[in-house]
Image (cartoon, rainbow, N blue to C red):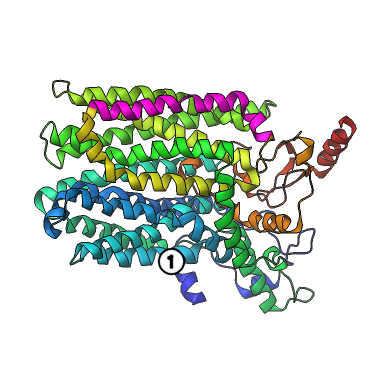
Amino acid sequence: MDRIERLLSRPTAKPYRSRDLEASETPFLNAQGHLDFAPGDVENPKEWSRPRRWYVTVVGVTLVVNATFASSSPSGCLESIADTFDVSVEATNLVITLFLLGYCFGPLFWAPLSEFYGRRWLFYLSFTAYLAFNFLCAFANNFGALLVGRFLTGTFASSALSNAPGVLADIWGPVDRGNAMGLFSMMTFIGPSLGPVISGFLQLKEDWRWNFYVLLWLAGATEILMFTIPETLPSIVLLNKARRLRALKIPGYENVQAPVEATDRTLAGIFKVALLRPWQILFDPISFLVAIYVGVVYALLYMLFTIYPIVFQQKRHWNAGVGELPLIGTIVGAVMAAGIVFYNSSRDVKRMLAGHTQRPEDRLPLAMLGGVMFAITMFWFAWSGEYNSVHWIVPTLAGVFLSCSILLIFVAFLNYITDTYLMFAASALAANTIMRSACGAAAPLFTQYMFDALGVGGGGSLIGGVATLLAPIPFIFYWKGETIRRRSRFAPTENKPKQEDKPADDEQQQERDISDDLEKDETSPSRQVTTSSESDLSRVRSREVEAGQEGARTDDGELRTATGEVVETEKDLEKHQAYRKETR
């Protein structure tokens, strides 16, 4: 098996070290005496060559494209499915709903497994199962079999959405990570928009099964690329290296251990945190209000795949293929939003280098812009789509800015959650993922009825009204967010009220230790686009930095103070600690 792994990963890997080369080197140990990456170590994923890291990035994003493309793809051929199985078009919307319900398993099931067993094997198993169950969908002989296949494919596809961001965080540093994460985030929006366009044209000449044939072809080609992904999770890379070194029996290092081997973590303990803590954090004020806002936005994203056919096919009598083409405008909007986010990220980096201390609330201006734009463009789209006398380009342009606003809201709020909850960020993002996936799953079931009853103008105005009510949320958080965070039991901040400064009991401390491994995995794709800031993911991924500490070294090798500032040496960190003690 080891030889097979090396053969499959050779196109992306530097030459594997021979046994003689490893035996001739002195293993690098950290301060605790555990195996660690030496400076410039070629086995450290962050030290791989840029071409290799970009190759792994592209393959990881391709896995995500399979999942997002498949989520909405059948929406362009629902009528064909209804005719084949003699069910209503409304019932066929379950094909989308059940797939999205499978997304809920990502942060609760696949993310904990990836932290325990590593990224690579989870990709191998889950994506192969996704490919296999797509055969069930393509050759289903009854409607029930199709629904079962869609739920299972959604469940296995969610592994890529949960773990691909973790792969990118493993191989890129905080500054370079922005471009890779930007590509990832754009594809999470572009994939769902392309699906209905392709299936719509297929329905004109073929039946609905051809939609799943396309998914099978795409998945089959991706399967070959997937086997070239090496292991990227640092803890597992070190674990594998420690096992090899022990087998070599190097004098003095016969019992060398990786850091993960020195912990008492268990899979049951990891799942306990992954399954319980998201529900606790969900009802924290910041997490709850953000979950509601993002849930509405995500529901609208999947409502669009029903609204666009109403506007351009039912009202303007375009065919199934051409009627889906205006969705390409949403792709343009996603690219525009990514450009805005990249510009904002570069500006944040410059401000930080100039001495500005980043607050979580500094993430919110993008949400303010997106929230106002969301409400305006929703009314614009609704009433321009209501009347056939209005040129088709007008609602299409509204869709461009609507998509742009959706991505801005996603990126800003999910970054805000990450910076607010720090070591509990993965649990907070998991709660948000479950909430928005549930909202997105419900959207296709009522959209047609809603717009039949209210019309495009009335139905769109209802959504626009809700957007108007939610628009003040980022402004309120920008104004009072710090005060709210100080009262939260999960948001670590300085100067908390005295009654909250209590030592954690044994159970709480044990959960925190377990969660340190989980918090390295970024479960929401949409948040990743702005992680080029120096104060970003490295704080989430740090195993040492916890509330109340004076500072520590992050997984990226940086020394950070308790306030998140980067210092050059241990001596600088000691000076900062001494200064803080004097000023208290």
**Residue 103, percent from left and from top:** 41, 53
Q: Quadrant of residue 501?
A: top right
Asked if the stretch drawn in magenta spans residue 476, the answer is: yes
Visible residue check, residue 561? yes
Where in the figure is residue 531, as x and y percent of width and height?
Answer: 55, 39
Residue located at (14% from left, 36% from top): 313
Residue, x 68% and y 73% (percent of image)? Answer: 245
| Residue at the spot 37% in from the left edge and 35% down from the top edge | 334
Picture quarter with the C terminus:
top right
Q: In the rendered image, is residue 358 in sight?
A: no
**Secondary structure under the numbered disc 1 in the rendered image:** helix
Residue type at mark 1 is Tyr
Of 205 and 84, the residue lying toward us:
84
Badge 1: residue crowd in 10 Å (few <14, some 14–19, many ≥20): some
Q: Which residues are magenta?
A: 457-486
Q: Which of the pair 433/183 is nearer the observer? A: 433
Which of the 4 image quadrants contains residue 31?
A: bottom right
As displayed, is residue 322 above or below residue 159? above
* Furthest-right residue in this view: 582
- Choose top left, top right, bottom left or bottom right for residue 268: bottom right
Q: Position of residue 209 (x, y in %)?
A: 18, 59
Residue at the spot of label 1: 124
Is residue 410 rendered to the left or right of residue 319? right
In the image, taking residue 543 as reference, residue 577 lies left or right, namely: right
Query: Does 247 lie within the magenta span?
Result: no
User: In the picture shown, does residue 130 fall above or below 481?
Assistant: below
